[in-house]
Amino acid sequence: MNDALLYRRQVGLWLAICAATILGMILLGGVTRLTNSGLSMVEWRPLLGIIPPLNHEQWLDVFAKYKTSPEYQIVNAGMSLAEFKYIFMYEYLHRVLGRIIGVLFFVPYAYFLLKGRIPDGYRVKLALLFVLGGCQGLLGWFMVKSGLVDDPRVSHYRLTAHLGLAVLIFGFMIWLTSSLLDSRHEQHAASAVPPWLGRLAAAVAILIYLMILSGGLVAGSRAGYAWSTWPLMGDSFIPPGLYATAPAWLAAFEDITTIQFNHRIFAYFIALLGGGLALAVLRLSQDRLARVAAGLFTLLLTTQITLGVITILYHVPIAAAAAHQVVGVSLFASAIYLARRLLIMEPLGSEKKSQFPT
């Protein structure tokens, strides 16, 4: 193995570990939200905040600060110290994991950069990932601040932005990881597929990302509690009061009935389009990895729809709702990998070898 290939694999494996950790972060963030723990830490201390309360007096001090918050005064008045510790630890662990991810990315990045081991074409992309990670931390605090006011609920717009940026960083890492770890010698004529198939896979990946943003609106506005029936919403497929606000377009972002309805429609559309994509790949492609990715995509899509239905019918149980979030992000990752795998293949009828995009 030559040095260039070795360095590609080292950087690719490092990014894969970072991506897996971010997926865990997204899961923990979902649990933090579902347990109503996100507003338990009323201060943001990027450096000293990694040290939790270590004795009873420190816990009482932190609890006293929480008691000044609107959430305690309006929602959790009379909460015991033990109950506070429970919600505090979820938010604390969420913030600590964020710092760990920062170190996990920056230290190897600096090492690879100083040693000249970052492959050509990746320096700017990795620097962009680092900047986006910093923005994500700032956006997280910006989201929390929106709930430390008279109405102790974080803005569903900021929550959606926070989730959306996390998923965007994760997806970017998956793309870069696959481009680094895919062998440049795997492409052959038998892998050729029609050009439209890769474009369809890319479109499906984009739609899944938009559906995740839609899910952020559902979570932030608590629209998941609006209707607990499926496949109907109440007594009909199209519920009453849909887009009843003025202006009507605002309902897509503010009205909980419309938000949940739109999320369902997104799911139905992606189920049809994604199912068609998987069947087309299995029929038209002989590439082993593309076929495996299509099978995994189908499994995740089926699981995601099932979890979505369970989450609705059982009034948003924590385990199902958290799994629904992390499987949705995993589905996005599988769509990204499948899209990239198809896009690098030589189009049918072409005699010229295409280059693997980085």
Image: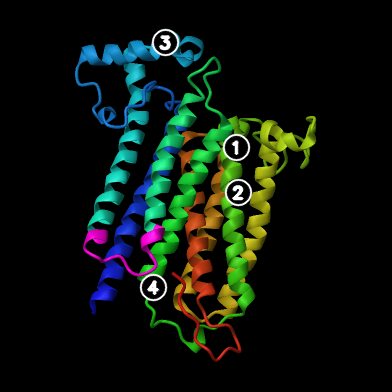
Residue ID for mark 1: 217
Q: Residues within 10 Å of mark 1 (few under 14, many from 20)?
A: many
Q: Residues within 10 Å of mark 4 (few under 14, many from 20)?
A: some
Query: What's the residue at 56%, 39% (across, down)?
Result: 216
Spatial separation of the CA atoms under disc 4 and disc 3: 53 Å
Q: Are marks 4 and 2 in contact (CB under 8 Å)?
A: no
Q: Are marks 3 and 2 in contact (CB under 8 Å)?
A: no
Q: Earlier in the sequence, mark 1 or mark 2?
A: 2
For the magenta stretch, what is the residue range? Answer: 112-125
Q: Are marks 4 and 3 in contact (CB under 8 Å)?
A: no
Residue ID for mark 2: 211
Spatial separation of the CA atoms under disc 1 and disc 2: 10 Å
Residue ID for mark 3: 68
Q: For the residue labelled by badge 4, is the local secondary structure a helix, a strand or a loop?
A: loop
Q: Amino acid at mark 4?
A: Asp
Residue ID for mark 4: 182
118 magenta-colored: yes
Classify the position of the N terminus by image quarter: bottom left
